[in-house]
Amino acid sequence: MPTDVTKAELIRLIIERLNNDLELFVNAAKTAHEAAIDEENQPDNKYDTTALEASYVAQGQANRAQELRRSIEIYKQLELSEKNEKIRIASLVTLGDQSGCQRKMFIGPTEGGLKISTESGDVTIITSLSPLGKNLIGKSVDDLIDISRGAAQICYHIVNVT
């Protein structure tokens, strides 16, 4: 049976994933920039926007790369405590639902929605600004939280907080 991932290991995996994503976005921005300045993509007439569109793509890719750089630095500086009684940023939370399924969530400062695969299962990064994150902040083990998902109401039981 695999052991639970530590928060330090999880942070290492998050930073590794963000660095991989950063490399992809930097390469994509370079490729889009090259397309924007390529002689073959220069406009033949006022309706030809190929180079302009490529420059917009390059700028978007460069902006995302900058966001990833900031997130990597934030995660590198994140202070971790071994055990939290109350859920806060940098808490690793195990939630159980009504059907007995359990999910692991990490309350991260950025990059909500990122899913990290570990030996003990997937961990989803959520931020304190998400609906679930807002409901979790300040709660403790054995607390119940209700989340609306469309017309459905889902009740989670907080199983563990580290």
Image: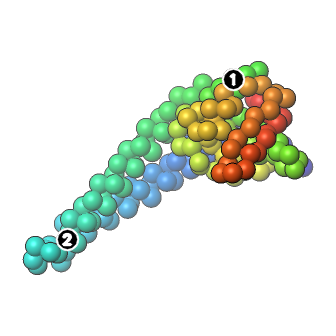
Residue at (17% x, 75% y) in the render: 48
Query: Callout 1: 10 Å neighbours few (<14), some, many (20+)?
Result: few
- Residue 14, percent from left and from top: 59, 44
**Residue 93 in view here:** yes
Residue 110 % position (x, y) = 52, 38
Number of dots carrying numbers: 2
Secondary structure at badge 2 equals: loop
Crowdedness near tag 2: few (<14), some (14–19) or many (≥20) residues, C-alpha within 10 Å: some
Q: Which residue is mark 1?
A: 138
Between the C-alphas of marks 2 and 1, the distance is 51 Å
Left or right of residue 72: residue 138: right
10 over 34 or under it: above or below: above
Image quarter of residue 82: top right
* Residue 35 versus residue 99 in the image, above or below: below
Q: Nearer the viewer, residue 156 or 78?
A: 156
Give the amino acid type for the residue marked by disc 1 in the picture.
Gly
The residue that disc 2 covers is 49
Colour scheme of this structure image? Answer: rainbow
Secondary structure beneath disc 1?
Answer: loop
Report the quarter where the C terminus lies: top right
